[in-house]
């Protein structure tokens, strides 16, 4: 169906292209964040397993998004109020790329690395990726909320626990 005042192609075609760009943008963020974690694993070999766990998870998120490209069921996407805008995705990707370049030329302290990681994990793109992945793999809707909450909080908790353990973060 063509919307009033719109010409061919139909609205759903534009939405499909926007959706593909949206998913590709989220995949790019996941892959850039994975690259940052890989660099941190090299910078902090005493914490290699910590960073490599995060690295592998980010690559897995990217893989889930790649699989999402092949799903045609739009209802698997998170609700629009949880989806970041393309501007947010582009800003997050630009931030991640800038941080990646910066840390490769100006090594950071362990505390700075944890703070960068925490900021990345708290981004809206991470929220979208984790919700979409949970949607794709949830067996029923009731378990979906639990999976979303667990997936999103896992990295944040792991990073915060490390920060607390090292004295870089205090609970209020």
Image: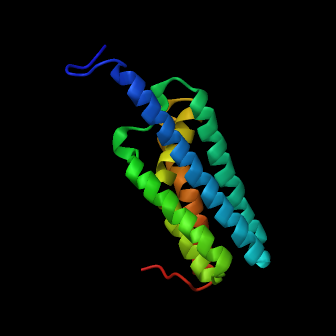
Q: Nearer the viewer, residue 60 or 16?
A: 16
Image spot of residue 83 (x, y percent): 40, 44
Quarter containing the N terminus: top left
Image spot of residue 120 (x, y percent): 52, 63
Write the residue at 54% across / 68% down. Answer: 98
Quarter where residue 112 is shown:
bottom right
In the displayed structure, does residue 40 sit left or right of residue 157?
A: right
Q: In this view of the protein, can residue 123 be seen by the observer?
A: no
Image spot of residue 116 (x, y percent): 55, 72
Quarter where residue 48 is shown:
bottom right
Image spot of residue 12 (x, y percent): 38, 23
Q: Nearer the viewer, residue 6 or 74?
A: 6
Q: Among all residues in the image, which is located at the extreme top?
A: 1
Write the residue at 60% across / 82% down. Answer: 111
Write the residue at 50% across / 61% down. Answer: 94
Residue 39, compared with residue 76, is above or below; it is: below
Q: Among all residues in the image, which is located at the extreme left?
A: 5
Residue 112, compared with residue 67, is above or below; it is: below
């Amino acid at each position: 169906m063509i919307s009033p005042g719109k010409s061919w192609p139909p609205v759903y075609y534009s939405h499909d292209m926007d959706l593909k760009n949206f998913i590709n943008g989220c995949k790019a963020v996941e892959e850039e964040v994975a690259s940052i974690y890989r660099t941190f694993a090299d910078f902090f070999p005493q914490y290699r397993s910590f960073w490599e766990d995060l690295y592998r998870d980010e690559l897995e998120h990217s893989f889930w998004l790649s699989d999402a490209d092949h799903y045609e069921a739009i209802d698997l996407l998170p609700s629009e109020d949880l989806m970041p805008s393309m501007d947010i995705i582009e800003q997050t990707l630009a931030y991640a790329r800038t941080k990646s370049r910066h840390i490769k030329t100006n090594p950071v302290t362990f505390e700075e690395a944890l703070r960068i990681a925490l900021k990345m994990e708290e981004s809206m793109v991470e929220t979208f990726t984790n919700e979409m992945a949970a949607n794709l793999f949830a067996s029923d809707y009731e378990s979906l909320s639990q999976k979303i909450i667990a997936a999103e909080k896992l990295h944040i908790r792991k990073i915060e626990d490390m920060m607390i353990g090292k004295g870089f973060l205090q609970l209020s």
